[in-house]
Image (cartoon, coloured by chain):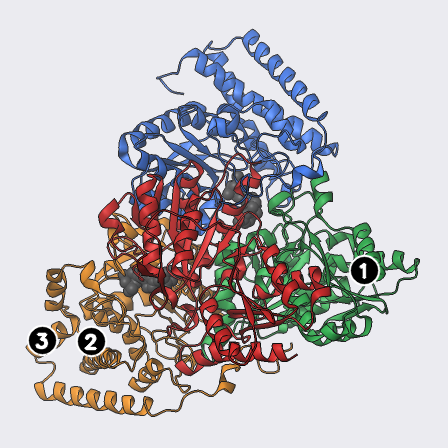
Chain colours: A orange, B blue, C red, D green
Amino acid sequence: MREKIPPLETLHQMYYYMALSRAIDTRLWQLGRQGKAHFVITPAGHEAAQVGAAMALRQGYDYFVPYYRDMTMCLAAGMTARDMLLHVRGAPEDPSSGGRQMFGHFSRRDLNIVSGSSSVGSQMLHAVGLALAFRNRGEDRVTLTGFGEGATSEGDWHEAMNFAAIHQLRVIFFCENNGYAISVPAHLEIGRVGVADKAAAYGMPGIRVDGNDILAVYETVSAAHAQTRAGGGPILIEAMTYRLLPHSNADDDSKYRASEEVQAARARDPITQFSTWLKDQQLMSDAEQQTMDARITQEVDAATEYAYSRPEPTEELLYQHVYAPGRTA
Amino acid sequence: MREKIPPLETLHQMYYYMALSRAIDTRLWQLGRQGKAHFVITPAGHEAAQVGAAMALRQGYDYFVPYYRDMTMCLAAGMTARDMLLHVRGAPEDPSSGGRQMFGHFSRRDLNIVSGSSSVGSQMLHAVGLALAFRNRGEDRVTLTGFGEGATSEGDWHEAMNFAAIHQLRVIFFCENNGYAISVPAHLEIGRVGVADKAAAYGMPGIRVDGNDILAVYETVSAAHAQTRAGGGPILIEAMTYRLLPHSNADDDSKYRASEEVQAARARDPITQFSTWLKDQQLMSDAEQQTMDARITQEVDAATEYAYSRPEPTEELLYQHVYAPGRTA
Amino acid sequence: MPELTMLQAIREAMDEEMARDPNVFVLGEDVGVKGGVFLATDGLFQKYGAHRVIDTPIAESGIVGVAIGASLVGMRPVAEIQFADYILPAIDQILNEAARFRYRSNGTWSCPLVVRAPFGAGVHGGLYHSQSTEKLFCSTPGLWVVIPSNPYDAKGLLKAAIRCDDPVIFFEHKRAYRSIKGAVPTQDYTVPLGKADVKRRGDDLTVITYGLAVQEALQAADEIARQGVSVEIVDLRTLHPLDKDCVLESVKKTGKVLIIHEDIKTGGIGGEIAAIIAEEAFDYLDAPIRRLGAPDVPSVPFNDAYERYVVPDVARMAKAMHDLAKY
Amino acid sequence: MPELTMLQAIREAMDEEMARDPNVFVLGEDVGVKGGVFLATDGLFQKYGAHRVIDTPIAESGIVGVAIGASLVGMRPVAEIQFADYILPAIDQILNEAARFRYRSNGTWSCPLVVRAPFGAGVHGGLYHSQSTEKLFCSTPGLWVVIPSNPYDAKGLLKAAIRCDDPVIFFEHKRAYRSIKGAVPTQDYTVPLGKADVKRRGDDLTVITYGLAVQEALQAADEIARQGVSVEIVDLRTLHPLDKDCVLESVKKTGKVLIIHEDIKTGGIGGEIAAIIAEEAFDYLDAPIRRLGAPDVPSVPFNDAYERYVVPDVARMAKAMHDLAKY
Ligand SMILES: Cc1ncc(C[n+]2csc(CCOP(=O)(O)OP(=O)(O)O)c2C)c(N)n1
Ligand SMILES: Cc1ncc(C[n+]2csc(CCOP(=O)(O)OP(=O)(O)O)c2C)c(N)n1
Ligand SMILES: [Mg+2]
Ligand SMILES: [Mg+2]
């Protein structure tokens, strides 16, 4: 991998977020099979891309506008296992939505993580609007928005890219290209070109990076962050990745992906790759890994227990937050 | 200009359509000032681009999906002065819309000219759908859709380009870049790149051509036609042009365009350029030009007289064609 | 007659129409190899190939816009929008383009196309997989809006929609796909667009509804019958243009009206129906026109309890019928 | 108090709010150097510069989506959609995003933004520059829909909209821009959202309306007064959420209701209003609830005669009032 290696603490954090995400995800699928979670959508396979991207930003200052697959990104941006379990449970305490949204609609205002809808492609314009606000206020905050390659087919993506480019705003468009929009393969959604190539249409830099290589992503996004922060305009990054599991717990991916393809991708699992490398380079000991893994297990167990012992929402809560308190202007 | 020059008859037709268009346009603005035409929108300055494009297609076989500024294109595709005057008058006989649409919404099914709305950008997807129908039917018809550079900002443009590219359909995307979307200059609508450059995002050829040079446009569109017809996929052409008059009779362009800029463009009027060249090359005599001009005057006068002596629509007509005859399926 | 689910009936309708008419083709997200996220198009790709069952990019406006273009020259596209919640990006193409093409061209061009979309709550879909968006399409002349309540109607109406010379928006309740079964003939038949259907005869009050709510209202009516209340149930089937005659005839007979829909009460199509009755059958009314719909919150929140609070169920329907009968 | 046109009042509202609050900014097509196609933002670019008066690409979804993003951190965008007909490409961002942001995030994020758009017919705009699209926004909780009928209300309501913490869709009748004048105070004031206003007191019947139609209904009421009919006119001002109390109070007093809007009758918001009355004031009604709207054709065709056939005018209003009074 890279020559310029981040400090040990950063490397361990990277491992921690990826492994935490995988442990939560595994728990979610279990809960799904047990009939305790209605909806599960997975970041499995995208962890390196998401952590590499999130850690390149300034937490608590820069803004995240994620999509439904960005659980790992949100963990690296400060959300917790408990947040995720409350969310999948649909508990009133769920910080993302108060139990109102299906899993995958992460939000915490105190962490600058913006709420999304399920509508593919709708969030990218919000990132551009945030960047416009920061430009007007003279703040150098950077806004990163995550999306799949499938989202680039929506008109809103085009309008977002165009607007950001015209005003040279501080936006990082972070595409996680896993080759499929549910079942539809890339050549039927984005044609013969890559997503990074589409940046040229807006006079924007477009960079392709191996999304399985966390350090490559971290370096690429760090450089992009420095550039856009300095006023260099928006940047499109295409992290090449793969979804290791079905689209969601409602999907049967065997209908549209050969099992050899999935197996081959599993053999390149970004978390195993990274932990193997860390150990090969003697940057993480078995004991250190075990400590982190144990902490993760404990966190996920505690979070599950907590979330699944919360009360149901009362009917009164249903009517909250339709309009601002007081209602009239 | 070019070495390969089209036959004399074609050259004279080119002149005729351009001059006819200008004469009609001049009449429309007169009628507008007299309060006899509520709405006028002008192709003045775009004539070379539009005639060059239209004449490269196979009339009665290929399809046109024009936009509101494409009067000249529609004339070259077979519409008449009478059609245009009936349209501006809003007469029930208006073949485009039966007096239902403002001027600029040209349509004649017998000439394969498809009806449009006023919504910028909405028609390009229809062109793609037509091309899909022809592909499915095994017909090699080519569909050309006209639009301004401003229309490329709409999400629908992106979706149309993407869909056409994925299925390698027989579509010519014909952009008339006149540098403004009403008052908004190109750098605020499409950024620092040209429209032709945007084709790369779809793996599509993008060609820029001088839209004031009718023979250059004719050659470019002819080549594109041959290529896409042969199965080479869709092509984007950007004809660089200029709108010589205000956007419409409701617009005051002095607010956003320096008069020097407009004067300079008038000095490059594509019609004068072409007729001067024809004469320089001894391809059109003064007498030939006068004959055509006289015929045009006569046609426009007759058309005006006809259109303005037609009856108003009855209330009964209002209710026609909301649904198919018989209404139920 | 074989018993089919709604889903099977809908799939058969498409299959048979594709076999009958080479102009019919299907397009949408995941409709190909996967057969649609609800499997409504399952097997069609394998049978009719990639030119007639087209997996599209995620671009709803594009899907409908392309369908419009193809329909102009006589193709009969059946576009699937994956969820009714995601039809909004396509609404400009539907309302401004498809619905007005015939009118704006003075009858020269027309758009014989169908847009299918699953709608409705009750499957834990949260705010963005539970919406009832049909009201947005019921105020634009030129458009048909159809919602079937059982497999027989679903198949016959979808076939009629595909053969219709104007654009049809066809909403399918996603909770009905597998839960509702019924007998469906094997011979070709259609159910006419624009005709409501009295699904139950009764004298004391008229319930006007559509979609899955018809099935639930029928159950509620049976319960109430035991208390001696006789309920007539009108299944609108076509929401736009409305079959006024059928509605008014029933109301004039019973004198009491309850309109039920799963969509939120305020702004749902119950308003238009009530208004027509209050204008054209006023003298026949013996009671206020009641509406039962979801409360005024933005769609259906995810948590089970929220879903229960929001979606009108058989018990609430029975209570509303009971209360109105007593008025 | 100076006499202003609607257009001037609207411009002043924006100007004063921009001066008062640095978070307020304007964006839209041609709003900058040109000052908008109707000149509603004339002079603002020169006064506040390119960062606060932003000429956008032709991308309505983009305009609203960007406004949403900016509003999330407390900016107060005022987006102009050039014609209400062209708001449709932005409807997903308005209904699915702006209106639900507060709810879906459990009160964490909100969208204090305004979308302004000129609507209505009578200026020979044909099918695509004449539409009344307000109904599409009146069925989504979380959203405000406001339509002023005179310069005083226009300025006060627009200021209130800009200060409102939730998204407001603000429609302005394009034929009223220059034709309607009225006194407007120079001191700062607001007109509260959510409150209807009785523009004329009367006893025989209630007319419920909004926008330019209020002015025409007032004229019609004056004519009818000479025949001894006393008409009360309720100007809704906010169409969503509705001021039910004001509507019901008036209806309970007069017992007869005529709802007027320029939008087509079927599917227009008159249906919802009639339904509320038929449900909640039924016992007070002395006559059918009448609605006067445009006929069921897709928008307003271009030709003058067509426009006359479609748009309800003072004479038709007076006749409808007269007929209802006689009932
Ligand atoms: C507007 C809209 N259309 C369709 C859907 C249904 N849908 C949900 S996820 C998805 C695929 C998205 O693919 P991509 O953007 O590549 O992201 P990935 O899931 O592969 O990470 C689709 C079609 C949706 N949620 N929103
Ligand atoms: C969807 C939509 N938005 C806005 C408008 C208003 N409008 C009409 S023409 C125009 C400018 C179009 O510019 P361009 O595409 O460059 O074509 P040009 O007029 O320059 O030929 C605008 C904004 C519209 N008609 N439709
Ligand atoms: Mg993907
Ligand atoms: Mg232009």
Report, in whole angstroms, how far the alpha carbon at label 3 lies from the one at label 1.
84 Å
Q: Which chain hosts label 2?
A: A
Q: Which chain hosts label 3?
A: A
Image quadrant occupied by the C terminus of chain A: bottom right
Label 3 crowd (10 A; few <14 / some 14-19 / many >=20): some
Label 2 crowd (10 A; few <14 / some 14-19 / many >=20): few
The amino acid on which the numbered mark 1 sits, given as a three-letter code, is: Leu
Q: Is mark 1 within 8 Å of ligand 2?
A: no
Residue B287 versus residue D99: which sits nearer the camera?
D99
Secondary structure beneath disc 2? loop
- Callout 3 touching callout 1 (CB < 8 Å): no
Residue B149, image x, y percentages:
47, 42
Label 1 crowd (10 A; few <14 / some 14-19 / many >=20): some
> In the rendered view, would you say A23 is above or below B78?
below
Tag nearer the camera, 3 or 2? 3
Q: Which residue is mark 2?
A: A6
Image quadrant occupied by the N terminus of chain A: bottom left
Residue A312, image x, y percentages:
41, 88
Q: Is residue D110 left or right of residue D220?
A: left
Q: Which residue is mark 3?
A: A276
Circle count: 3
Q: Is residue A173 left or right of residue D127?
A: left
- Callout 1 touching callout 2 (CB < 8 Å): no
Q: Is mark 2 within 8 Å of ligand 1?
A: no
Residue A258 versus residue A203: which sits nearer the camera?
A258
Secondary structure beneath disc 3? helix
The amino acid on which the numbered mark 3 sits, given as a three-letter code, is: Thr
Report, in whole angstroms, how far the alpha carbon at label 1 lies from the one at label 2.
81 Å
Where is residue C177, by image quadrant?
bottom left
**Label for residue D324?**
1
Identify the residue shown where x is 74% and y is 51%: D312
